[in-house]
Amino acid sequence: MTKGPAISNDPMYQLLREGKIEEFNAKKQSGEYCNLKGCDFRSLDLRGIDAVGLDFRGAYFRQTDLRGVDLRGSLLDGCSLNAAKISGTYFPLNIPAQEILLSLEHGTRLRVIHEKKEPE
């Protein structure tokens, strides 16, 4: 049996759950650490979040409002986007559009393409 999405006690995650995006961004920019892996963002409004460098691996974004969010600098392996609002959202280039569509429509977990490094 797999573990479901977590409601973390991390103070930075709690700011997002409370809709305090500006406060989250300010603390993030001042260097405050946050652990968002495997967290439950279900139905939250994350518009305006500074997502650069955030580790969302395994996170659950069902019906989350991600409109206009730049996720290009985020780690999204294993995320689920079922029914999320993604108009104007940037995704990393290593996630094919078909993966995003499958996750939106069916809740599948995003599979990220990792480049294989040639031996030196």
Image (tube, rainbow, N blue to C red):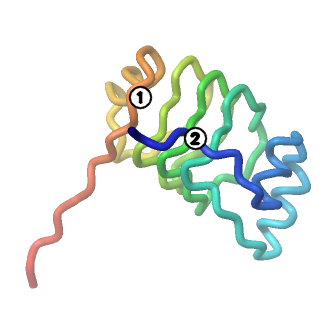
Amino acid carrying mark 2 in the image: Pro
Q: Residue at x 22, y 59 (%)?
A: 115
Question: Which residue is disc 2 drawn over?
Answer: 5
- Label 2: which secondary element: loop
For the C terminus, give its image quadrant. Answer: bottom left
**Residue pictured at 55% horizontal, 43% vertical:** 59
Seen at 38% across and 45% down, the residue is 93
Question: On the image, numbered disc 1 is attached to which residue?
Answer: 100
Q: Are marks 2 and 1 in contact (CB under 8 Å)?
A: no
State the residue at coordinates (75%, 38%).
46
Asked if residue 72 lies left or right of residue 7, the reply is left
Task: Locate the N terminus and report the quarter of the image it occupies.
Answer: top left
Residue 94 percent across, percent down from the top left: 34, 47
Q: Is residue 10 left or right of residue 113?
A: right
Percent position (x, y) of residue 67? 68, 29
Of tags 2 and 1, the one toward the viewer is 2
Numbered badge on residue 20: none
Q: Quadrant of residue 41?
A: top right
Instruction: Please report whichever mark, 2 or 1, sits nearer to the chain's N-terminal start.
Output: 2
Q: In the depicted view, which residue is nearer to us: 105 or 115? A: 105
Question: From this viewpoint, which residue is outermost toward the bottom?
Answer: 120
Say which element carries label 1. Answer: helix
How many numbered discs? 2
